[in-house]
Amino acid sequence: MIELYEQEADCYVGGVDGSGDPSQPTLVSDSNLNNVLKLTAARSHNEMKRNLAALNDRLEAGEDIEEELRLLILENAREHFNELEKRGAARKSKLCKNKPGKNRNKITQQLTSTSYRAVKDLLAAKKKVFTANKQACGSKALTSGNVLVAGYKFVAEHVWEQQGVKTFLQSMIDGVGPGGNTLTAGVLSWTPFSSTSSAFFNTWASAGVSWTGAGTTPMETFYSILGTLSNSDNLLILDSQTNGMKAIIW
């Protein structure tokens, strides 16, 4: 299973539009919905790149395509575009020093998550398999068991989404919560992220911290808690369609 996480290419805080501004409403017109549905009809990676290039040309021409980009990301989460990144692999995302605006992406730093166990390994470890009942809603919509249900695609899934690390840190740097509220504790300094040798990427020992838990750096520790090749405590097996919707909600 391979997925594209378009939202992680930008420094968004909340929502799914990648703008980094959680206070902006999501408004979708019928005309833009139809345009995006046409775009998402293409399945190949090359076609996807051509579609995105066409959108970029329209953006540079001054056309407002924000609604279409929002929907493009939403459709990706439902697995229309799932050809760029293998599930289980380490994922890269970025933090932005500047607040939302024209200088948002001028100064950035890359985060790298940890690889995690695949479905077959989680089955061997007797992790629970969760499947959505497409004919039910509410508390009966999700059932659990120990085997893969026929007719579904399954993925190894984090109980806590990996993008939560990036979203949490970016929210602290911006001083803005996912709902657009100002954080009462103030703004997190950019200093720990200013270079690859800064505190967040350097070893605990170099900071004078005696650490015996998972991860040799703060970044590794953050991601290790979510699930790794050696730690499956916060990993489970989930049908892929539900996983896509979970990513949107998160």
Image: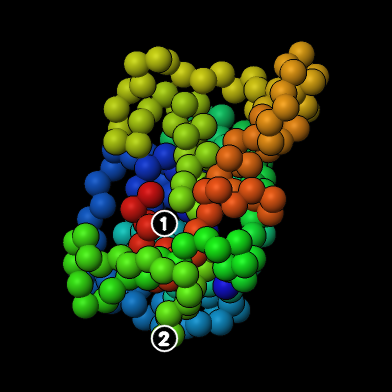
Query: In front: mark 1 or mark 2?
Result: 2
150 over 248 or under it: above or below = below
Q: Residue 154, how many percent across, how many down? A: 49, 73
Amino acid type indicated by mark 1: Ala
Q: Is residue 50 visible?
A: no
Q: Residue at x 56, y 29 (%)?
A: 97
Question: Is 204 placed left or right of 142 in the picture?
Answer: right
Find numbered disc 1 in the image and state the secondary structure of the residue it sits on: helix
Q: Residue 247: which disc?
A: 1
Q: Residues within 10 Å of mark 2 (few under 14, many from 20)?
A: few
Find numbered disc 2 in the image and state the secondary structure of the residue it sits on: loop
Q: Residue at x 62, y 71 (%)?
A: 120
Q: CA distance from mark 1 to mark 2?
A: 22 Å
Tag count: 2
Q: Residue 151: which disc?
A: 2
Location of residue 209 (image quadrant): top right
Q: Residues within 10 Å of mark 1 (few under 14, many from 20)?
A: some
147 over 7 or under it: above or below = below
Q: Residue 99, how many percent across, how many down? A: 46, 30
Q: Is residue 25 visible?
A: yes
Question: Is 156 placed left or right of 35 in the picture?
Answer: right
Q: Are marks 1 and 2 in contact (CB under 8 Å)?
A: no
Q: Residue 182, how many percent across, how many down? A: 33, 23
If the image is split into quadrants, where does the N terminus sit? bottom right
Q: Residue 72, how many percent across, how many down? A: 40, 66
Q: Which of disc 2 and disc 1 is earlier in sequence?
A: 2
Question: Is 153 placed left or right of 49 in the picture?
Answer: left
Question: Is 35 placed left or right of 243 in the picture?
Answer: left
